[in-house]
Image (tube, rainbow, N blue to C red):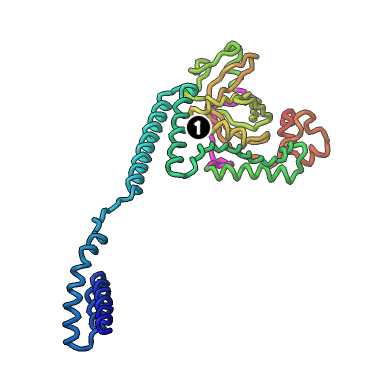
């Protein structure tokens, strides 16, 4: 009975120490102390356990052989490196192809010859999109420029003819022209002007002289030194593009004035424009130039410059019917003397 108990205790102790060999030392010590309460029994148990452990350790070493640890490296990093290198290579190809296409365009390549290069570039971009997993960028669309709406010019009311204007409107229009002259630095009412020839003197000096279209540029047929200067009232004005013809009347008669844009522009580039804008029938002006005969044979002063002497505030009577009403002629004696030269005699 005693022998069977001790044998059973030895087996329990042997299994305990076998487990303790597989656990940390701290646990083995705790398990060993849990089975022995006295120092004498602990020594006996330890000697038995050592014998038993030595018997079981060969089997334990065979059944629990240590397998060397082998570190297994993942292939994820290597695959990522390969993919990034492939992406970089495709991007380099795209950049090179883009530079090649730009050079071809600068050299003036035709569109049919350029098309294969463009297709190759698009294929490379599609390949790059597959590698990166991003959708390929669509080619930029050229925005069609919307035609700019032309600003509709405000239709200005047509200028009224003087015959359709009231007396007050005529006065305001002409005084407005006088103010425009002052704003431009010109005086509409000159203080002094010295003409050196009258209409009658020129008619007498050039009677029977000069052929139609001929000009006396050197004053060979007159005793006047330098340019001929005349002054008088504008009785009629006719403007034809770059030419203008005025009928000038002084106290001795009438003479025709010819104004040419190019000739006037030699001294003042705005002279012809101002002549058309500022002058009206009834104004008193002065003009300087040379004498010529027109193709129709009319004696004419070919002007090089002109000067406003007096700006008329009201127009002259109708040039066709004149001043025929006797009562008006007596009430407007100054107009009767202007439009009816015979009255002066």
- Check disc 1: other Cα within 10 Å, few if <14, some if 14-19, many if 20+: some
Residue 72 visible in image? yes
**Magenta part of the chain:** 185-200
The answer to whether residue 125 is magenta is no
Q: Out of 273 and 259, give the one closest to the viewer.
A: 273
- Quarter containing the N terminus: bottom left
From the image, give the main secondary structure of the stretch colored magenta: loop
Residue in the picture at 57% in, 17% down:
292
- Rendered residue at 19%/77% (across/down): 48
- Residue at 51% in and 28% down: 265
- Which image quadrant is residue 8 in? bottom left
On the image, the x and y values in percent for residue 90 come to 38, 36
For residue 334, say whether it is visible.
no
Q: Classify residue 7 as left or right of residue 274.
A: left
Q: Does the magenta stretch include residue 188?
A: yes
Q: In which quarter of the image is residue 120?
A: top left
Residue indicated by mark 1: 268
Numbered marks: total:
1
Give the left or right position of residue 129, taking residue 27 as reference: right
Q: Position of residue 255 (x, y in %)?
A: 63, 24
Observer-nearest residue: 260 or 91?
A: 91
Q: In this view, does 182 lie to the left or right of 40?
A: right
Is 333 displayed left or right of 327 in the figure? left
Nearer to us in this view, 260 or 18: 18
Quadrant in the picture for the C terminus: top right
Residue at disc 1, secondary structure: loop
Q: Position of residue 24 (x, y in %)?
A: 24, 73
Front-most of 235 and 129?
A: 129
What residue is at 22 percent from the left and 75 percent from the top? 25
| Percent x, y of residue 55 | 20, 68
Residue furthest to the bottom in view is 38
């Amino acid at each position: 009975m005693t022998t069977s108990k001790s044998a059973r205790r030895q087996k329990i102790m042997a299994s305990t120490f076998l487990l303790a060999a597989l656990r940390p030392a701290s646990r083995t010590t705790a398990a060993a102390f849990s089975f022995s309460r006295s120092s004498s029994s602990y020594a006996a148990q330890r000697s038995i356990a050592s014998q038993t452990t030595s018997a079981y350790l060969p089997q334990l070493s065979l059944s629990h052989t240590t397998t060397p640890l082998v570190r297994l490296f993942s292939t994820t990093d290597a695959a990522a490196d390969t993919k990034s290198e492939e992406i970089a290579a495709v991007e380099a190809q795209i950049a090179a192809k883009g530079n090649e296409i730009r050079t071809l365009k600068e050299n003036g390549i035709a569109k049919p010859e350029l098309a294969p290069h463009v297709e190759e570039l698009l294929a490379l971009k599609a390949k790059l999109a597959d590698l990166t997993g991003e959708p390929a960028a669509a080619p930029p669309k050229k925005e069609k420029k919307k035609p700019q709406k032309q600003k509709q010019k405000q239709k200005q009311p047509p200028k009224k003819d003087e015959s359709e204007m009231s007396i007050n409107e005529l006065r305001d229009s002409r005084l407005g022209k006088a103010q425009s002259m002052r704003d431009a630095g010109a005086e509409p009412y000159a203080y002094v002007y010295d003409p050196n020839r009258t209409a009658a003197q020129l008619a007498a000096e050039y009677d029977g002289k000069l052929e139609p279209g001929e000009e006396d540029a050197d004053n060979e047929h007159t005793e006047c030194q330098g340019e001929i200067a005349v002054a008088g009232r504008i009785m009629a004005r006719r403007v034809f593009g770059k030419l203008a013809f005025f009928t000038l009347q002084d106290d001795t008669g009438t003479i025709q004035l010819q104004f040419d844009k190019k000739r006037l522009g030699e001294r003042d580039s705005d002279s012809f424009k101002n002549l058309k804008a500022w002058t009206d029938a009834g104004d008193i002006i002065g003009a300087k130039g040379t004498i010529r005969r027109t193709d129709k044979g009319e004696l004419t002063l070919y002007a090089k410059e002109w000067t406003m002497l007096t700006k008329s505030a009201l127009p002259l009577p109708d040039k066709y019917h004149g001043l025929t009403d006797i009562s008006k002629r007596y009430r407007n004696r100054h107009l009767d003397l202007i439009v009816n030269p015979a009255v002066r005699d």
